[in-house]
Amino acid sequence: MVDFIKELEKCTECGKCKEICPITRVREEPVYSPRSKSQLLKKLKNNEKLTEKEYDSIYLCTRCGICDDYCPEDIPISDIIQKEREIIAKKGEEPKKTSHIVNNIFEKYNPGGYEVSERKNWVNEELEFSDNSKIGYMAGCWISYKHPEIAQNTIKILNKAGIKPQLIDQEKCCGLFVTDNGHVDEFEEYAKNYMGEIKSQGIEKLIVSCPSCYSQMKHEYAKQYEEPEFEVKLSVDFFNKLLKEERLTLKNDDLNLSIKDGCHGKDASEAPREILEETNNGSKELSEEIICCGAPAGVKPLYPDISDDIGMLSIEKADQVSDEMITYCPFCLYHFEDVVERKKEDAKPIVDLTNHLIRLIE
Ligand code: SF4
Ligand code: SF4
């Protein structure tokens, strides 16, 4: 068990975390810096009352983890913020919107509270599945309810390579929002049951389309609960493998593309670049400067203006350097499209990588 208070003492106030944090990129107030957010743990542990700004600061965090990567002292800043949220939630003082979304996930298995019966509405007769396949597919919440064509196109690509996956009987949210908001203990039973359900279907490799589901199930479940007894693979990483094995062929295109990662799935981020290298002579990097879209972990519902401003950083950068932004995170896509619709109708297209590949498949 890491002693977070001891970790906080290592801080040299170098300011590197503040330079990179998406929140302080758009709101410069010192209280919003990752260092300031994390130091509030001492106040919470001492039962001292937080000011309104300090409270906001703890929830003004997408848990993108970039501060952890940049901190020269290796202070686990985003884990400390998760712990702070846990303390606040246990006192019954977390934001009402956060509690509402957490409840949606426990009760309806998705953050938006959409009907469970509508989750697989994207499945149609054109798509081929096999109940005996050892390869499973999990679309994730945002794709199931907001971008069903990504799930359909994923299955079309797999079918093209001769793979008929099976679906999870009762697909559920991976629970990233729940654990991001400090409900780690409460989520244990859900996570273990869900992993057991997937395993009981004979699935040995689970293809997931969302980098957040990938990271949550592969890394966070293993860190907090137990290692899944099946392999978790990000869809674009699996597509790259199929391309290398020549089980898929793609046309080249001459589009001027930029690429945007999500906060999660960094260990699979080479795959989309390799695919675009093959088909497009590469793409312009957006994630070097701006890693986060600004929406996750409650920032979008709680602080929509700040979330929009962070989203706009990537949208404007992509507009400057490319004709299309390619992303493979459905939550980034959902957020960017929402921002564009309300604030920048003339923005250039933002395209999911799976949808892009369908344009190129031969
Ligand atoms: S996890 Fe991301 S949003 Fe949160 S404090 Fe660190 S850099 Fe900022
Ligand atoms: S990067 Fe690390 S050491 Fe530097 S101010 Fe932030 S928390 Fe402190």
Image (cartoon, grey):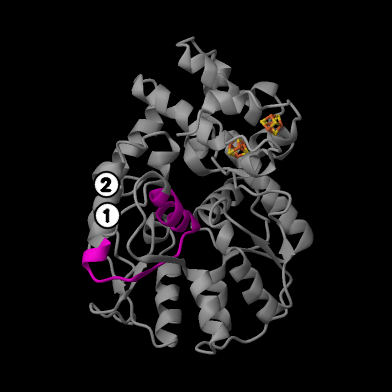
Q: Which residue is mark 1?
A: 194
Q: Amino acid at mark 1?
A: Tyr
Q: Which mark is residue 255?
A: none
Q: Is residue 42 above or below residue 222?
A: above
Q: Which residues are magenta?
A: 198-222
Q: Quadrant of residue 64?
A: top right
Q: Which residue is mark 2?
A: 190
- Image point 71% across, 75% down: which residue? 255
Task: Let me know if residue 25 appears in the view.
Answer: yes
Q: Position of residue 283 (x, y in %)?
A: 72, 69
Magenta part mainly helix, strand or loop?
helix
Task: Let me know if residue 37 appears in the view.
Answer: no
Q: CA distance from mark 1 to mark 2?
A: 6 Å
Q: Nearer the viewer, residue 131 or 124?
A: 131
Q: Nearer the viewer, residue 173 or 43?
A: 43
Q: Quadrant of residue 253?
A: bottom right
Can you tell me which quadrant of the image ligand 1 is in? top right
Confirm or deny contact between disc 1 and disc 2 (CB under 8 A): yes
Q: Is residue 289 above or below residue 306?
A: below
Tell me the element at label 1.
helix
